[in-house]
Image (cartoon, rainbow, N blue to C red):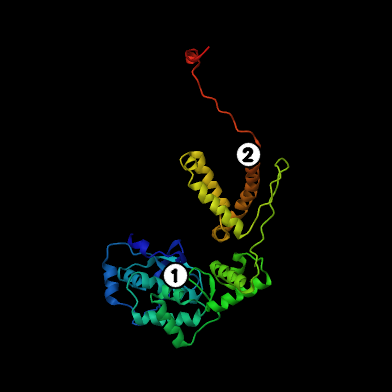
Amino acid sequence: MDLEARYQDPDAGTDVEWIPIAELELSHSPRSAGESDEHIRVLAQSQAELPPIVVQRGTNRVVDGVHRVRAAQLRGEREIRARLFDGDDASAFVLAVRLNVRHGLPLSLADRKTAAGRILREQADWSNRKIASAVGLSPKTVATLREAAGRPGGPARIGRDGRVRPVSAAAGRERAREVLLREPSSSLRAVSAVAGVSAGTVRDVRERLRQETGAVVPGPRRAAPVRGADVPRARPAVSGPKALDRSNALLRSLRTDPSLRFNQSGRLMLSILAVAAMDPQTQDSLVLDLPDHCIDFVAELAKSSVLAWQDLEARLSQRRSAPPARKECAVNPERRGNYGP
């Protein structure tokens, strides 16, 4: 990785402009000890072009690169390359800390703890891990600083991935329980979004409700299968755990059959039948992991596959009711006379 690539950040902007050094504001820095004269001299004596600094748009405040600005001044330069950052002061400070932790002259431990304290005051709803990743501290250290500062935040916090999660897992589980009791047919994704917990947690809460009440807590409603006019009506399928267990048992039996395992058509049939034996948990995982822009396409294909399965069953039924096909030996007609009239 080249020197300039180390200084790039997705939040710092991509367009590079030349800005007059005299117009820059250099008084906002996360370094309590100020600038390092030695580091400035090293940068000024370098033959390489200095990477662009980061400047807050509208204020010309230098978010990252004060030492590079001073080095450019020592070189006698009047302009410097810069990327423009669009954001408020709180966001600019977080970006300044994150960039100074990653490259250049590292921030001291005291400066990183001070930065964490400021972020806790301005972004109390950030999770400990999100703050820790910005300031270069461990989540446990941030948790200790949070407790000392008395900044617990609200019942939920924003994680590094931008998702909001409850601070207490018990509170999230209770919200999921309330939603399932009120709307038992809700999907895992819908309950997860409302309760602020993972889909796996919602699944566990649903299973516990089943055990506690002894009743069936239904999962998400599935659309009725679409039947074509030219497709014979299939026998209604038996659903539930017993049907799933039987499907899996049949599939295991077929997988041990050499007549299927050792030819291409048989292996294809086994892979297709594996979809029919899919348990509800696997279905939920596939649905939750599917990108939003693919949902409509997959749903349409799933609906079309209903017709394909019904057609397959009709063909199998026809073959089952038909008399066995008689297979004749392929005898060479030129040699037929050697075996009879």
Q: Vertical placement of 152 versus 203: above or below?
A: below
Quarter of the figure with residue 188: bottom right
Residue 300, numbered circle: none
Location of mark 2 (residue): 320
Left or right: 110 in relation to 281: left
Q: Which residue occupies the extreme right position in the image?
A: 229
Left or right: 179 in relation to 27: right
x and y percent of residue 105 in the render?
32, 73
Q: Amino acid at mark 1?
A: Val
Location of mark 1 (residue): 55
The residue nearer to you, when weighing 265 against 340, is: 340
Q: First in sequence: mark 1 or mark 2?
A: 1
The residue nearer to you, when weighing 152 against 59, is: 152
Q: Amino acid at mark 2?
A: Arg
Discs 1/2, front = 2
x and y percent of residue 62 in the render?
42, 73
The residue carrying pointer 1 sits among few (fewer than 14), some (14 to 19) or many (20 or more) residues within 10 Å by Cα, namely many
Q: Quick one: SS at disc 1?
A: strand
Report the quarter where the N terminus lies: bottom left
